[in-house]
Amino acid sequence: MAFNHVCVVGLGYVGLPTAAVLASRGIRVSGVDVNPKTVESINAGKPHIIEPDLDMVVHGAVAKGQLTAHAHAVSADAFIIAVPTPFDHALKPDLSYLEAATRSIAKVLKKGDLVVVESTVPVGATKQTAAWLTEERPDLRFPDADNPSAPHDVCIAHSPERVLPGRVLLELVRNDRVIGGLGDDCAHCTATLYATVVEGEMHLTNAATAELVKLSENAFRDVNIAFANELANVAEPLGIDVREVVKLANHHPRVNILNPGPGVGGHCIAVDPWFIAATAPERTPLIQTARRVNDARPGTIADQIVALASVQAGGAVSCLGLSYKADIDDLRESPSIHVVLELRRRISNPILIAEPHVDALPESLAQLQDVRLVSFEEALSGANAIVLLTDHKAFALKDPTVLGGKDVIDTRGAWNF
Ligand code: SAJ
Protein backbone atom coordinates (compact mmCIF):
# COMPACT_ATOMS: atom_id res chain seq x y z
CA MET A 1 0.00 0.00 0.00
CA ALA A 2 1.42 3.40 -0.99
CA PHE A 3 0.78 6.60 0.91
CA ASN A 4 1.35 9.59 -1.33
CA HIS A 5 -0.53 12.13 0.71
CA VAL A 6 -0.83 12.23 4.50
CA CYS A 7 -3.01 14.60 6.53
CA VAL A 8 -1.69 15.27 10.05
CA VAL A 9 -4.32 16.70 12.40
CA GLY A 10 -2.86 18.74 15.27
CA LEU A 11 0.43 20.54 14.62
CA GLY A 12 1.83 20.59 18.14
CA TYR A 13 4.88 19.07 19.82
CA VAL A 14 4.27 15.70 18.10
CA GLY A 15 2.17 16.48 15.02
CA LEU A 16 4.42 19.14 13.54
CA PRO A 17 7.69 17.16 13.78
CA THR A 18 5.87 14.07 12.41
CA ALA A 19 4.45 16.10 9.50
CA ALA A 20 7.82 17.68 8.76
CA VAL A 21 9.76 14.39 8.83
CA LEU A 22 7.20 12.62 6.59
CA ALA A 23 7.39 15.58 4.18
CA SER A 24 11.20 15.43 4.22
CA ARG A 25 10.89 11.80 2.95
CA GLY A 26 9.07 12.98 -0.16
CA ILE A 27 5.49 12.38 1.01
CA ARG A 28 3.02 15.19 0.39
CA VAL A 29 1.81 16.30 3.82
CA SER A 30 -1.13 18.54 4.69
CA GLY A 31 -1.05 19.65 8.32
CA VAL A 32 -4.23 20.81 10.01
CA ASP A 33 -4.56 22.98 13.09
CA VAL A 34 -7.45 24.87 14.70
CA ASN A 35 -5.14 27.77 15.60
CA PRO A 36 -4.92 30.20 12.62
CA LYS A 37 -1.61 31.62 13.94
CA THR A 38 -0.05 28.14 13.88
CA VAL A 39 -1.25 27.59 10.29
CA GLU A 40 0.09 30.98 9.20
CA SER A 41 3.45 30.52 10.88
CA ILE A 42 4.00 27.02 9.43
CA ASN A 43 3.06 28.18 5.92
CA ALA A 44 5.72 30.86 6.37
CA GLY A 45 8.19 28.02 7.11
CA LYS A 46 8.48 28.89 10.80
CA PRO A 47 7.61 26.38 13.52
CA HIS A 48 5.78 27.88 16.52
CA ILE A 49 7.55 25.58 19.00
CA ILE A 50 11.17 25.24 20.06
CA GLU A 51 12.74 21.86 19.27
CA PRO A 52 16.29 21.23 18.04
CA ASP A 53 16.51 21.28 14.19
CA LEU A 54 12.74 21.55 13.73
CA ASP A 55 12.99 25.02 12.15
CA MET A 56 15.37 23.69 9.50
CA VAL A 57 13.21 20.66 8.62
CA VAL A 58 9.95 22.65 8.55
CA HIS A 59 11.51 25.43 6.49
CA GLY A 60 12.91 22.93 3.98
CA ALA A 61 9.64 20.99 3.64
CA VAL A 62 7.53 24.14 3.21
CA ALA A 63 10.00 25.67 0.72
CA LYS A 64 9.80 22.50 -1.43
CA GLY A 65 5.99 22.57 -1.29
CA GLN A 66 5.92 19.14 0.44
CA LEU A 67 4.31 20.52 3.63
CA THR A 68 1.34 22.88 3.75
CA ALA A 69 -0.81 23.88 6.72
CA HIS A 70 -4.59 24.24 6.67
CA ALA A 71 -7.46 25.18 8.95
CA HIS A 72 -9.60 22.21 7.87
CA ALA A 73 -9.04 18.54 7.11
CA VAL A 74 -7.91 17.76 3.58
CA SER A 75 -8.63 14.55 1.61
CA ALA A 76 -5.56 12.25 1.83
CA ASP A 77 -4.57 8.55 1.82
CA ALA A 78 -3.74 8.47 5.53
CA PHE A 79 -4.68 10.59 8.56
CA ILE A 80 -2.53 10.92 11.67
CA ILE A 81 -4.33 12.41 14.66
CA ALA A 82 -1.97 14.08 17.15
CA VAL A 83 -4.18 16.34 19.26
CA PRO A 84 -3.98 16.94 23.03
CA THR A 85 -5.73 14.55 25.40
CA PRO A 86 -5.75 16.38 28.75
CA PHE A 87 -7.60 15.38 31.88
CA ASP A 88 -10.50 17.24 33.44
CA HIS A 89 -10.97 18.52 37.00
CA ALA A 90 -12.08 15.08 38.15
CA LEU A 91 -8.80 13.60 36.77
CA LYS A 92 -10.75 11.84 34.01
CA PRO A 93 -9.48 11.86 30.37
CA ASP A 94 -10.93 14.66 28.25
CA LEU A 95 -11.32 13.26 24.74
CA SER A 96 -13.08 16.32 23.29
CA TYR A 97 -10.12 17.28 21.02
CA LEU A 98 -9.83 13.70 19.75
CA GLU A 99 -13.56 13.59 19.07
CA ALA A 100 -13.50 16.94 17.23
CA ALA A 101 -10.48 15.88 15.15
CA THR A 102 -12.07 12.51 14.32
CA ARG A 103 -15.36 14.07 13.28
CA SER A 104 -13.48 16.69 11.21
CA ILE A 105 -11.70 14.06 9.08
CA ALA A 106 -14.89 11.99 8.65
CA LYS A 107 -16.13 14.39 5.97
CA VAL A 108 -13.14 13.74 3.67
CA LEU A 109 -12.60 9.99 4.39
CA LYS A 110 -12.88 7.54 1.52
CA LYS A 111 -12.61 3.79 1.00
CA GLY A 112 -9.01 2.53 1.37
CA ASP A 113 -7.89 5.30 3.74
CA LEU A 114 -5.96 4.78 6.99
CA VAL A 115 -6.62 6.61 10.29
CA VAL A 116 -3.90 6.52 12.98
CA VAL A 117 -4.43 7.84 16.50
CA GLU A 118 -1.03 9.02 17.78
CA SER A 119 -2.34 10.97 20.76
CA THR A 120 -1.90 9.19 24.09
CA VAL A 121 -5.32 7.84 24.98
CA PRO A 122 -7.08 5.76 27.64
CA VAL A 123 -7.80 2.13 26.82
CA GLY A 124 -10.78 1.94 24.48
CA ALA A 125 -10.35 5.33 22.81
CA THR A 126 -9.28 3.90 19.42
CA LYS A 127 -12.43 1.77 19.44
CA GLN A 128 -14.38 4.92 20.34
CA THR A 129 -12.76 6.68 17.35
CA ALA A 130 -14.26 4.00 15.08
CA ALA A 131 -17.64 4.57 16.73
CA TRP A 132 -17.50 8.34 16.06
CA LEU A 133 -16.52 7.70 12.44
CA THR A 134 -19.37 5.20 12.04
CA GLU A 135 -21.81 7.84 13.31
CA GLU A 136 -20.49 10.41 10.85
CA ARG A 137 -20.12 8.08 7.87
CA PRO A 138 -22.69 5.28 7.88
CA ASP A 139 -21.83 4.74 4.19
CA LEU A 140 -18.34 3.38 5.12
CA ARG A 141 -17.45 0.20 7.07
CA PHE A 142 -14.98 0.67 9.93
CA PRO A 143 -13.04 -2.05 11.78
CA ASP A 144 -14.59 -3.64 14.83
CA ALA A 145 -12.27 -4.46 17.75
CA ASP A 146 -14.64 -7.25 18.86
CA ASN A 147 -14.59 -8.83 15.39
CA PRO A 148 -11.23 -7.79 13.90
CA SER A 149 -11.51 -10.05 10.87
CA ALA A 150 -14.78 -8.42 9.72
CA PRO A 151 -14.36 -6.60 6.39
CA HIS A 152 -13.87 -2.81 6.55
CA ASP A 153 -13.33 0.05 4.08
CA VAL A 154 -11.00 2.12 6.28
CA CYS A 155 -8.14 0.93 8.52
CA ILE A 156 -7.81 2.33 12.06
CA ALA A 157 -4.84 1.90 14.41
CA HIS A 158 -3.22 3.38 17.51
CA SER A 159 0.48 4.10 17.20
CA PRO A 160 1.49 6.13 20.24
CA GLU A 161 4.28 8.64 19.90
CA ARG A 162 7.21 7.96 22.24
CA VAL A 163 9.47 10.92 21.53
CA LEU A 164 11.25 12.83 24.24
CA PRO A 165 10.85 16.62 24.03
CA GLY A 166 14.27 18.07 23.22
CA ARG A 167 15.14 14.98 21.09
CA VAL A 168 11.96 14.69 19.05
CA LEU A 169 13.40 14.57 15.51
CA LEU A 170 15.99 12.01 16.49
CA GLU A 171 13.63 9.76 18.46
CA LEU A 172 10.87 9.96 15.84
CA VAL A 173 13.19 8.12 13.49
CA ARG A 174 15.23 5.92 15.84
CA ASN A 175 12.73 4.72 18.46
CA ASP A 176 10.91 1.42 18.15
CA ARG A 177 7.20 1.86 17.50
CA VAL A 178 4.26 -0.05 18.91
CA ILE A 179 1.36 -0.26 16.48
CA GLY A 180 -2.03 -1.55 17.59
CA GLY A 181 -4.60 -2.30 14.91
CA LEU A 182 -8.35 -2.29 15.42
CA GLY A 183 -8.94 -4.71 12.57
CA ASP A 184 -6.66 -7.60 11.58
CA ASP A 185 -4.84 -5.82 8.72
CA CYS A 186 -4.76 -2.34 10.29
CA ALA A 187 -1.42 -2.66 12.11
CA HIS A 188 0.34 -3.93 8.96
CA CYS A 189 -1.09 -1.11 6.91
CA THR A 190 0.09 1.44 9.52
CA ALA A 191 3.57 -0.11 9.65
CA THR A 192 3.85 0.52 5.89
CA LEU A 193 3.23 4.21 6.48
CA TYR A 194 5.75 4.55 9.33
CA ALA A 195 8.36 2.50 7.47
CA THR A 196 9.02 5.63 5.40
CA VAL A 197 10.50 7.36 8.47
CA VAL A 198 11.10 4.87 11.31
CA GLU A 199 14.45 3.10 11.58
CA GLY A 200 13.56 1.38 14.87
CA GLU A 201 11.65 -1.89 15.07
CA MET A 202 7.89 -1.92 14.66
CA HIS A 203 5.97 -4.13 17.09
CA LEU A 204 2.47 -4.99 15.93
CA THR A 205 -0.38 -5.76 18.32
CA ASN A 206 -4.02 -4.84 18.86
CA ALA A 207 -5.24 -1.31 19.65
CA ALA A 208 -6.16 -1.84 23.32
CA THR A 209 -2.76 -3.40 24.09
CA ALA A 210 -0.95 -0.53 22.35
CA GLU A 211 -3.00 1.96 24.38
CA LEU A 212 -2.01 0.31 27.67
CA VAL A 213 1.65 -0.08 26.59
CA LYS A 214 1.99 3.67 26.09
CA LEU A 215 0.32 4.49 29.41
CA SER A 216 2.47 1.90 31.20
CA GLU A 217 5.70 3.47 29.91
CA ASN A 218 4.89 6.86 31.37
CA ALA A 219 3.38 5.45 34.58
CA PHE A 220 6.53 3.36 35.11
CA ARG A 221 8.66 6.48 34.92
CA ASP A 222 6.31 8.41 37.20
CA VAL A 223 6.39 5.67 39.86
CA ASN A 224 10.20 5.49 39.67
CA ILE A 225 10.56 9.30 40.00
CA ALA A 226 8.05 9.24 42.90
CA PHE A 227 10.29 6.69 44.63
CA ALA A 228 13.29 9.00 44.12
CA ASN A 229 11.30 11.98 45.41
CA GLU A 230 10.15 10.01 48.44
CA LEU A 231 13.79 9.14 49.16
CA ALA A 232 14.57 12.88 48.91
CA ASN A 233 11.81 13.59 51.44
CA VAL A 234 13.49 11.09 53.79
CA ALA A 235 17.12 12.11 53.15
CA GLU A 236 16.84 15.92 53.14
CA PRO A 237 15.73 16.37 56.80
CA LEU A 238 18.47 13.88 57.82
CA GLY A 239 21.12 16.01 56.10
CA ILE A 240 21.91 13.17 53.67
CA ASP A 241 22.60 14.02 50.02
CA VAL A 242 19.88 12.05 48.22
CA ARG A 243 21.73 12.27 44.89
CA GLU A 244 24.69 10.47 46.38
CA VAL A 245 22.30 7.82 47.74
CA VAL A 246 20.75 7.34 44.28
CA LYS A 247 24.12 7.35 42.54
CA LEU A 248 25.60 4.73 44.87
CA ALA A 249 22.45 2.56 44.91
CA ASN A 250 22.49 2.58 41.11
CA HIS A 251 25.90 0.91 41.18
CA HIS A 252 23.99 -2.24 42.08
CA PRO A 253 23.54 -4.13 38.80
CA ARG A 254 19.77 -4.49 39.20
CA VAL A 255 18.87 -1.06 40.62
CA ASN A 256 18.05 1.98 38.49
CA ILE A 257 16.50 4.81 40.48
CA LEU A 258 15.70 8.00 38.54
CA ASN A 259 16.53 11.52 39.75
CA PRO A 260 14.65 13.34 42.47
CA GLY A 261 13.63 16.88 41.61
CA PRO A 262 11.04 19.59 42.25
CA GLY A 263 8.22 17.37 40.90
CA VAL A 264 7.07 15.93 37.60
CA GLY A 265 5.74 18.12 34.83
CA GLY A 266 4.90 18.07 31.16
CA HIS A 267 1.88 16.85 29.34
CA CYS A 268 2.77 13.15 29.48
CA ILE A 269 4.18 11.70 32.67
CA ALA A 270 2.16 14.04 34.91
CA VAL A 271 -1.05 13.19 33.02
CA ASP A 272 -1.02 9.69 31.55
CA PRO A 273 -0.97 7.70 34.82
CA TRP A 274 -4.38 9.21 35.58
CA PHE A 275 -5.70 7.58 32.38
CA ILE A 276 -4.89 4.17 33.82
CA ALA A 277 -6.32 5.16 37.19
CA ALA A 278 -9.55 6.40 35.57
CA THR A 279 -10.01 3.00 33.91
CA ALA A 280 -9.42 1.02 37.12
CA PRO A 281 -9.67 3.33 40.17
CA GLU A 282 -9.83 0.48 42.70
CA ARG A 283 -6.92 -1.44 41.17
CA THR A 284 -4.29 1.32 40.87
CA PRO A 285 -3.28 2.41 44.41
CA LEU A 286 0.45 2.48 43.52
CA ILE A 287 0.02 4.57 40.37
CA GLN A 288 -2.27 7.05 42.13
CA THR A 289 0.01 7.35 45.16
CA ALA A 290 3.03 8.00 42.91
CA ARG A 291 1.13 10.85 41.24
CA ARG A 292 0.33 12.34 44.65
CA VAL A 293 3.93 11.99 45.89
CA ASN A 294 5.22 13.83 42.80
CA ASP A 295 2.49 16.47 42.98
CA ALA A 296 3.40 17.18 46.63
CA ARG A 297 7.09 17.89 45.84
CA PRO A 298 6.66 21.57 44.87
CA GLY A 299 5.08 22.23 48.30
CA THR A 300 8.05 20.54 50.01
CA ILE A 301 10.51 22.65 47.98
CA ALA A 302 8.52 25.79 48.90
CA ASP A 303 8.81 24.83 52.59
CA GLN A 304 12.60 24.48 52.19
CA ILE A 305 12.80 27.94 50.56
CA VAL A 306 10.72 29.55 53.31
CA ALA A 307 13.12 28.13 55.92
CA LEU A 308 16.19 29.84 54.38
CA ALA A 309 17.74 32.54 56.62
CA SER A 310 17.68 35.25 53.92
CA VAL A 311 14.01 34.55 53.21
CA GLN A 312 13.16 34.63 56.92
CA ALA A 313 14.87 38.05 56.97
CA GLY A 314 12.44 39.27 54.26
CA GLY A 315 14.83 39.20 51.30
CA ALA A 316 13.95 38.45 47.68
CA VAL A 317 13.94 34.89 46.27
CA SER A 318 15.18 34.11 42.76
CA CYS A 319 13.66 31.10 41.03
CA LEU A 320 15.59 29.89 38.00
CA GLY A 321 13.64 28.06 35.30
CA LEU A 322 9.90 27.77 34.65
CA SER A 323 9.69 25.11 31.94
CA TYR A 324 9.01 21.56 33.11
CA LYS A 325 12.47 20.36 32.14
CA ALA A 326 15.75 21.63 30.73
CA ASP A 327 16.22 23.48 27.46
CA ILE A 328 12.64 23.51 26.22
CA ASP A 329 9.95 26.23 26.31
CA ASP A 330 7.09 23.98 27.48
CA LEU A 331 5.48 25.20 30.72
CA ARG A 332 2.67 22.62 30.83
CA GLU A 333 2.12 21.14 34.31
CA SER A 334 5.52 22.55 35.25
CA PRO A 335 6.50 21.90 38.88
CA SER A 336 8.46 25.18 38.83
CA ILE A 337 5.22 27.11 38.43
CA HIS A 338 3.72 25.22 41.36
CA VAL A 339 6.78 26.02 43.50
CA VAL A 340 6.28 29.75 42.81
CA LEU A 341 2.53 29.53 43.51
CA GLU A 342 3.16 27.65 46.77
CA LEU A 343 5.84 30.17 47.72
CA ARG A 344 3.53 33.14 47.15
CA ARG A 345 0.93 31.45 49.36
CA ARG A 346 3.45 31.18 52.18
CA ILE A 347 5.47 34.43 52.01
CA SER A 348 5.22 37.98 50.63
CA ASN A 349 8.94 38.46 49.84
CA PRO A 350 9.72 39.66 46.27
CA ILE A 351 10.10 36.76 43.81
CA LEU A 352 12.38 37.12 40.77
CA ILE A 353 12.04 34.56 37.99
CA ALA A 354 14.55 33.84 35.25
CA GLU A 355 13.34 31.82 32.24
CA PRO A 356 15.28 32.43 29.02
CA HIS A 357 12.72 30.57 26.86
CA VAL A 358 9.73 32.87 27.47
CA ASP A 359 9.08 36.60 26.92
CA ALA A 360 6.41 36.95 29.59
CA LEU A 361 5.24 35.19 32.73
CA PRO A 362 2.33 32.75 32.33
CA GLU A 363 -0.99 34.21 33.48
CA SER A 364 -1.08 32.18 36.71
CA LEU A 365 2.13 33.92 37.86
CA ALA A 366 1.69 37.32 36.15
CA GLN A 367 -1.32 38.05 38.36
CA LEU A 368 0.64 37.47 41.60
CA GLN A 369 1.93 40.38 43.70
CA ASP A 370 5.64 41.19 43.44
CA VAL A 371 6.62 38.41 41.03
CA ARG A 372 8.82 39.59 38.11
CA LEU A 373 10.47 38.00 35.09
CA VAL A 374 14.14 39.06 35.02
CA SER A 375 17.37 38.07 33.30
CA PHE A 376 19.56 35.28 34.70
CA GLU A 377 22.14 37.90 35.73
CA GLU A 378 19.55 40.01 37.57
CA ALA A 379 18.17 36.90 39.28
CA LEU A 380 21.65 36.06 40.58
CA SER A 381 22.48 39.58 41.73
CA GLY A 382 19.00 40.62 42.93
CA ALA A 383 18.39 38.06 45.68
CA ASN A 384 20.20 36.26 48.46
CA ALA A 385 18.08 33.13 48.07
CA ILE A 386 18.71 31.37 44.76
CA VAL A 387 16.64 28.34 43.78
CA LEU A 388 17.47 26.34 40.67
CA LEU A 389 14.21 24.78 39.49
CA THR A 390 15.00 23.85 35.87
CA ASP A 391 18.52 22.89 34.85
CA HIS A 392 18.71 24.83 31.56
CA LYS A 393 22.16 24.91 29.94
CA ALA A 394 21.85 28.70 30.12
CA PHE A 395 22.06 28.43 33.93
CA ALA A 396 25.46 26.73 33.94
CA LEU A 397 27.67 28.71 36.28
CA LYS A 398 30.82 30.04 34.65
CA ASP A 399 31.91 31.45 37.97
CA PRO A 400 30.39 29.66 41.00
CA THR A 401 31.70 32.40 43.31
CA VAL A 402 28.71 34.55 42.22
CA LEU A 403 26.74 32.41 44.68
CA GLY A 404 29.19 33.11 47.51
CA GLY A 405 27.39 33.99 50.75
CA LYS A 406 23.94 33.30 49.28
CA ASP A 407 21.38 30.68 50.32
CA VAL A 408 21.17 28.19 47.45
CA ILE A 409 18.75 25.34 46.76
CA ASP A 410 19.59 23.27 43.69
CA THR A 411 16.53 21.07 43.13
CA ARG A 412 18.11 19.37 40.11
CA GLY A 413 21.58 18.59 41.39
CA ALA A 414 23.00 20.50 38.42
CA TRP A 415 25.45 22.80 40.20
CA ASN A 416 28.56 21.27 41.69
CA PHE A 417 30.27 23.56 44.14
N1 SAJ B 1 12.00 14.03 35.87
C1 SAJ B 1 12.51 13.89 37.15
N2 SAJ B 1 13.47 12.95 37.38
C2 SAJ B 1 13.96 12.16 36.38
C3 SAJ B 1 13.43 12.30 35.08
C4 SAJ B 1 12.46 13.24 34.86
O1 SAJ B 1 12.09 14.59 38.09
O2 SAJ B 1 14.85 11.35 36.66
C5 SAJ B 1 10.96 15.01 35.60
C6 SAJ B 1 11.34 16.03 34.54
O3 SAJ B 1 12.07 17.09 35.08
C7 SAJ B 1 9.98 16.46 34.03
C8 SAJ B 1 9.16 15.17 34.12
O4 SAJ B 1 9.84 14.33 35.04
O5 SAJ B 1 9.40 17.44 34.85
C9 SAJ B 1 8.98 14.43 32.82
O6 SAJ B 1 10.17 14.48 32.03
P1 SAJ B 1 10.72 13.27 31.17
O7 SAJ B 1 11.95 13.75 30.50
O8 SAJ B 1 10.86 12.07 32.00
O9 SAJ B 1 9.58 12.91 30.16
P2 SAJ B 1 8.64 13.76 29.15
O10 SAJ B 1 7.32 13.97 29.82
O11 SAJ B 1 9.31 14.95 28.58
O12 SAJ B 1 8.46 12.67 27.97
C10 SAJ B 1 7.88 11.40 28.30
C11 SAJ B 1 8.79 10.30 27.73
N3 SAJ B 1 8.37 9.01 28.28
C12 SAJ B 1 9.29 8.16 28.78
O13 SAJ B 1 10.46 8.40 28.86
C13 SAJ B 1 8.74 6.84 29.28
C14 SAJ B 1 8.68 10.31 26.21
O14 SAJ B 1 9.38 9.22 25.65
C15 SAJ B 1 7.20 10.22 25.79
O15 SAJ B 1 7.05 10.26 24.38
C16 SAJ B 1 6.49 11.43 26.37
O16 SAJ B 1 6.58 11.34 27.78
C17 SAJ B 1 5.04 11.41 25.92
O17 SAJ B 1 4.69 12.17 25.01
O18 SAJ B 1 4.27 10.58 26.43
Image: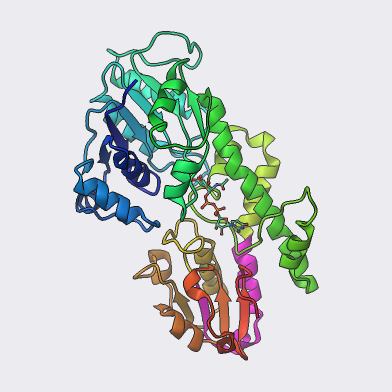
The answer to whether residue 314 of the structure is visible from this angle is yes
Is residue 98 placed above or below 345 in the rendered structure? above
Using the image as rendered, state which of residue 134 and residue 399 is in the foreground. Answer: 399
Q: Residue at x 25, y 46 (%)?
A: 61
Q: State the extent of the magenta-drawn residues as a range.
A: 297-320
Is residue 317 placed above or below 167 in the rendered structure? below
Q: How is the image coloured?
A: rainbow
Which quadrant is the C terminus positioned in?
A: bottom right
Q: Position of residue 355 (x, y in %)?
A: 43, 71
Does the magenta segment cover residue 298?
Answer: yes
Using the image as rendered, state which of residue 344 and residue 375 is in the foreground. Answer: 375
Q: Position of residue 351 (x, y in %)?
A: 49, 79
Is 121 displayed left or right of 414 in the figure?
Answer: left
Q: Residue furthest top?
A: 150
The answer to whether residue 88 of the structure is visible from this angle is no
Q: Position of residue 396 (x, y in %)?
A: 53, 75
Is residue 299 placed above or below 1 in the rendered structure? below
Is 387 displayed left or right of 117 in the figure?
Answer: right
Q: Residue at x 56, y 38 (%)?
A: 215
Total number of numbered discs in the rendering:
0
Is residue 327 placed above or below 87 in the rendered structure? below
Q: Quadrant of residue 84?
A: top left
Does the magenta segment cover residue 366?
Answer: no
Q: Residue at x 61, y 90 (%)?
A: 404
Q: Position of residue 19 (x, y in %)?
A: 32, 41
